[in-house]
Image (cartoon, helix red, strand yellow):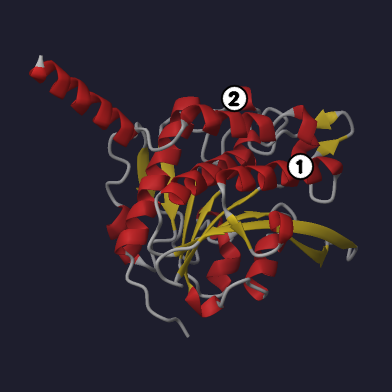
Amino acid sequence: MKKILLLTFLVISATAQSQIVDRSTLLSDIETLSSKKFEGRKTGTPGNKLAADYISKRFSEIGLRSFQDGFRHPFTFKNRAEESKNGTNLIAYVKGKTDKVIVVSAHYDHLGSNGSTLYYGADDNASGVGAMLAFAEYFRKNRPLHTLLFIAFDAEESGLRGAYHFVSEPVVSKKNIVLNVNMDMISHNDKKELYASGTYKHPELKRIIQGEDKNTGIKILFGHDLPDTGKDDWTMQSDQGAFARANIPFIYFGVEDHKDYHKPTDTFENINQDFYYGATTAILKSIVKLDKDLVTGTRK
């Protein structure tokens, strides 16, 4: 009987360790954010505001801290037609044991609608936001060494406007920001491949997270960050670009473009649920390792 009880305990413990992400909540968040109700979440639209309300509510439910009421940080920008537009970044944080900061980010805006055609944006980028919420849940219960900022950026589809606004007017001292971990499109890949871009200039980051995809069902690949290689360089392809421009190290987790990219077919039904869960787990394990092993100094 004692052997049976011991075996049962070990199985339960192993299962608990492997399931550091709540799969049902993860899938619920991406399904909700990519639903018709949010109208494609285009910056400045009612659907985008509903998405901001939802994410803010989730931040509050998780128990995250805010820098101001409601987690909302509005900003203005000009579009390509030089028209003034309004956006809203959503910023929450978990206080770490030091003031050194890792920014964990994902954009929540998407393309909205074009006449009767709705762009749901499940992979791009309800997937990144859902993962970020899962990470926030974990670190709220497991205090990190670094202070972690969780940011849902707006207006990424308009030229990374939300990220540029944050980097130009950060809510913490910029010299204390040691890393940006950005997620954009992490739920749709038939080859079970997730890229971690940004380690070319900072190989120490690759050494830290290498192997953290073990037992997750997916494979983390490195690349798409070689300078001067044209479209193969993803540095400026999402919000991490604003951090790169400010010489802040980054890791961008994402998949290669697929047939549903920027199409009305980027829906919850077309994501790879097992891949998404595995990718989210692998990224969380990577952030845990980065928080533990990243040697942080004061940048100038």
Q: How crowded is mark 1: few (under 14 residues within 10 Å), some or many (20 or more)?
A: many
Closer mark to the observer between disc 2 and disc 1: 1
Say above or below: 129 vs 217: below
From the image, tell me which residue sits under label 2: 270
Q: Residues within 10 Å of mark 2 (few under 14, many from 20)?
A: few
Residue drawn 29% across and 62% down?
293
Q: Position of residue 232 (x, y in %)?
A: 51, 54
Residue drawn 21% across and 26% down?
9
In terms of image quadrants, where is residue 170?
A: bottom right
Q: Where is residue 59 in the image (x, y as percent from the top left)?
A: 61, 48
Secondary structure state at the residue bearing disc 2: helix
Between 1 and 56, the one nearer to me in the picture: 1
132 left or right of 178 in image: right
Q: Distance between the residues labelled 2 and 1?
A: 18 Å
Between 172 and 34, the one nearer to me in the picture: 172
Between 34 and 234, the one nearer to me in the picture: 34
* Mark seen at residue 18: none
In terms of image quadrants, where is residue 226?
A: bottom left
Between 84 and 227, the one nearer to me in the picture: 84
111 left or right of 277 in image: right
Can residue 233 be seen here? The reply is yes
Say above or below: 124 vs 204: above
The N terminus lies in which quarter of the figure?
top left
Give the residue type at disc 1: Arg
Secondary structure state at the residue bearing disc 1: helix
Can residue 237 be seen here? The reply is no
Q: Position of residue 160 (x, y in %)?
A: 68, 60
From the image, tell me which residue sits under label 1: 41
